[in-house]
Image: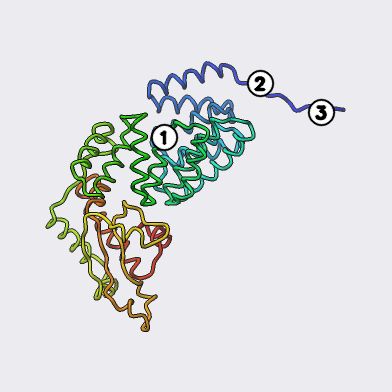
Amino acid sequence: MVKRTEKRAEPEGVKERLKAVEAAFEAEEFERALAQVNTLLEAAPKLPEALHYRAAALVELGQFEEAVRAYRQAVKSHPEDLEFLLGAADFLICRMGEDREAVEEGLELCARGRKLAHRRDDVEGVYEFLLLEGMGLNQLGECTRALVSLDAALVHVPRSVDAHVERGISLFELCQFEEARMAFEEVLEDAPEEAWAHHYLGLIAERRGDMRESRKRFAKAQALLPQEFPPPVALAEEEFDQALEAAVKALPEHVKGYLDNVTISVEDLPSNDDLLAQSPPLSPSILGVFRGTPVGERSVTNAYDHFPAAIVLYQKNLERFARTREELIEQIGITVMHEVGHLVGLDEDDLWERGLD
């Protein structure tokens, strides 16, 4: 006797209810959309469109932890659904970018989605996953790998402004400033109002000392995307030095003992020598740097280890990083602690675990 799996009838009015959710989204009434889709999921727990709308509504409402769970549920229920994989990866990489583990999870989804899209000859899908992959790798500081993904994305969509911008960011982070400048100039030929290209051209001009050009580029970026590029919080030299002194005084007493033979100074921007002292190079946007040998690695036979170590804070980068004066002063303290961490031998993973990345 042949046993057939019982077919479940689709709940009544699904299409109409989905249209109502869509209308709520278009009206940006996300609370209403979430309530409607939750009701729909009670009747149809694995309905793909409903799962997608629920995760998207949670993102729009800023309920990111719930959104993570919602996307994971959606991907688990429909593991080969490219829309779910792309939506989850985009959320984890673009909305949770400060969370390294979230970005890594997003990159895993990109790899899965890219392979599925390739098997289905979905060129647009392959491109989307490669672009997200490049963005995620840039956020993790793996910019050489990011270039590989972005170049592959551009094979599929050669005139993609997003991919060209992200590629320029990779080059900038790798301290290939002239190549980055040319990349962003090319972006502006196709998209003259691309704010990120103007911003990075401002950073590049600033590094070469062309302050007139940098001010022009920064002003253009701020005019185009004021929420992304607010005017930097500026402190007078005396105020900045006072904030730095206060940060040092606030260090635990047992940590201050390590600073006896350490100079602490302020510079506008990191020099090429500092950036290129490591491989891969340090980011031009670093907030500070430790120069010298960590305490636990010093040797009595190495003359270099007896030279004074140094901690340097970069004022322009710190001022751009912060959105308020209070945040800037707080970040000065965090950066001092970060570099003292390097002084005592902590690496970036150790600092990340301590919330000092």
As drawn, the residue found furthest toward the bottom would be 301
Disc 1 crowd rating (10 Å Cα; few below 14, some 14-19, many 20+) is: some
Real-space Cα distance between discs 1 and 2?
Answer: 43 Å
Secondary structure of residue under mark 3: loop
Query: Which of the image's four quarters has the C terminus?
Result: bottom left
Report x, y in % for residue 227: 27, 35
> Which residue shows up at 25% across the image and 47% down it?
320
Q: Earlier in the sequence, mark 2 or mark 3?
A: 3
In this figure, which residue is indicated by the disc labeled 2? Answer: 9
- Hey, what amino acid is under mark 2? Ala
* Residue beneath the point at 42% across and 21% down: 24
Q: Which amino acid lies under the numbered mark 3 shown in the image of this protein? A: Lys
Q: Position of residue 27 (x, y in %)?
A: 38, 21
Q: Tag 2: Cα neighbours inside 10 Å, few (<14), some, or many (≥20)? A: few
Helix, strand or loop status at disc 1: helix
Left or right of residue 216, residue 128 in this image: right
| Residue under numbered circle 3 | 3
Quarter of the view holding residue 345: bottom left
Above or below, 169 against 237 in this view is above
- Residue tagged 1: 162
In the figure, is residue 237 to the left or right of 116? Answer: left
Report the side of 250 relative to 157 (left or right). left
Are the residues flagged by discs 3 and 1 in contact, CB closer than 8 Å? no
Given the image, on which type of amino acid does mark 1 rest? Asp
Residue in the picture at 25% in, 62% down: 312
Q: Position of residue 346 (x, y in %)?
A: 39, 66
Q: CA distance from mark 2 to mark 3?
A: 18 Å
Q: Nearer the viewer, residue 319 or 22?
A: 319
CA distance for labels 3 and 1: 52 Å
Mark found first going from the N terminus, 1 or 2:
2
Please name whichever residue, 354 or 172, is drawn nearer the observer in this view of the structure.
172
**Towards the viewer: 266 or 39:** 266
